[in-house]
Image: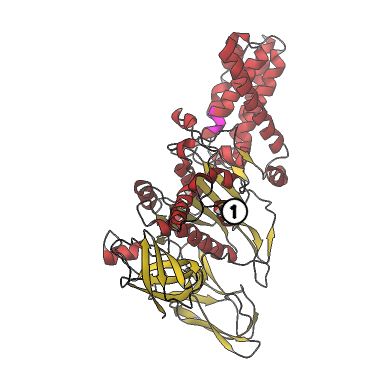
Amino acid sequence: METGRIIKVAGPVVVAEGLRGAKMYDVVKVSNQKLIGEIIELTEDLVTVQVYEETSGIGPGEPVFSTDMPLSVELAPGLITSIYDGIQRPLDIIRSTKGNFITRGAEAYAIDRKKKWDFKPILKKGDKVTTGDIIGTVQESSIIQHKIMIPYGIQGEIEQIYTGKFMVTDTVAKIKESQGSITEIKMLQKWPVRKSRLYKEKLPPFEPLITGQRVIDTFFPIAKGGTACIPGPFGSGKTVVQHQLSKWCDAEIIIFIGCGERGNEMTDVLLEFPELIDPHTGKPLMERTVLIANTSNMPVAAREASVYTGATIAEYYRDMGYNVALMADSTSRWAEAMREISGRLEEMPGEEGYPAYLGTRISNFYERSGRVKCICSDNREATLSVIGAVSPPGGDLSEPVTQNTLRTVQVFWSLQDKLAYKRHFPAIDWLTSYSLYLSQLSDFFKREINEDFIELRNKSMGILQEEAELEEIVRLVGIDALSTHERLILETAKSIREDFLHQDAFDNVDTYTSIKKQFLILKLIILFHETAEKVIKKGVTIEELNTLPVKAKIVRAKFIEEKKMEKFIEIEKEIISQIDSITTL
């Protein structure tokens, strides 16, 4: 192990000399306390290190030890249900050995080296294998089957494969490569966090990530393998939306990164997630979740690394063939960590003090998403969806992090504090949000839900936009200046907002709405509107329409249980018969 010497300390940035064989992004151990750091700059015989722990008390002259390895994560059975910090130290294990506070230099294996897993081979001796091929499985949790893959760069013939209970460091197979050498395959792999895991081909997304949230699935859908951002000011509900997506979206694996969030918010996540029940399986949600917790009072450099740690774990499960969703809360704190380290390095600042490479880093992170054809012989496909929360100061969406994120992502869910203050949740503004996946997903909605789905969605959006224009007139001259048809538009828009877009996360029925039920609810609202339009021409007033008993049934439609869908047909018939009855009076 090569040893150097500290010559300068500036917060989490340390400059050392004497590490002649050092390479960019190598991990080093700083001082005799063995604090973990990473080389981020090389200048002649000097190396600049960002340290992932508190550096107070460390001074010039202390040693720096090189590991000659980049910052990497351990990938093996045992990731699911784990809670890590930003550099994959297991918080529950450190707590059991060090107490409630992480002491400097604390180390623990990310993957338990003593636990034995029941390895079941699916290939046999003599089978040909290549990079990414699955040779066996381990039941990691009651929900997730962990697939053991051939590591990158290895191909050949299975010389020996074992069955039984093994630790992650035990050999489970031996591969005879083309040159005759024997390679031992273990369940434990490592991968550098700043390098994306490889794939054969990136494919266009074609299927929506169903979340059960009506404003998202119907109006601004995200594709499986897509990217989305949730910018919004303090108190607008970014974290709650991500919790809902984590619980209800139809991804098989959830990676949740708490990147620089307040300690109390992260505590809520850590306490709530183990208690949540996965609605798809009835098992605890943690049995398909990996949590990465890096709060705002933890070292700033580890916050910068946490998103890469989460992305690498997500890509690993994607390579097994799973649909993975990654939640990053919040990328603004990650960008602030970059800004602080850039300042310590005395780099030329860009806009608002952020480094000039901010846009590149953000785009590189979101580009790790996608629907891909994995490297393997069976050509399996899988997806990684990335959803990042952004916390712009004062809700200013023109600030650099939000703008650079919007240049990269395809879906923009604009959270508004004014909606949150009106108790309208999710507080996603339907007038400023957008999804660029609509054209790609329209075939899916027409084929799987109803051929009128997109037309219904577009008509509803048109009504909401007309409402915004009419409200300006109402503010200026009053509602009496509007025609009966224009007043009907206001009534229908109110119904769309309150009876469709508003959703109660704490109601057992309303918290999740299947895409089929979403279509049926919206169809009731638009059917009432279109039928009312016809009778208004015959002199029927808005007051008469509002007194119809079926109006109350439309309001309560979102509380109809999924197994009682036939009630929607009954309400449709009532809408037509009750409106017709007015004209015959």
Tag 1 secondary structure: helix
* View extreme (bottom): residue: 180
Q: Is residue 529 visible?
A: yes
Question: Which amino acid, by three-letter code, is at mark 1?
Answer: Ser
Asked whether residue 340 is drawn in magenta, I would say no
x and y percent of residue 65 in the render? 39, 75
Please name whichever residue, 333 or 137, is drawn nearer the observer in this view of the structure: 333
173 versus 133 height, above or below? below
Location of the N terminus by quadrant is bottom left
- Specify whether 437 is left or right of 342: right
Q: Residue at 50%, 46% (x, y): give it.
A: 389
x and y percent of residue 565 in the render? 59, 37
43 versus 169 height, above or below? above
Location of the C terminus by quadrant is top right
Q: Residue at 56%, 14% (x, y): give it.
A: 475
Magenta region = 498-502
Mark 1 crowdedness (10 Å alpha carbons): few <14, some 14-19, many ≥20? some
Residue under numbered circle 1: 363
563 versus 173 height, above or below? above
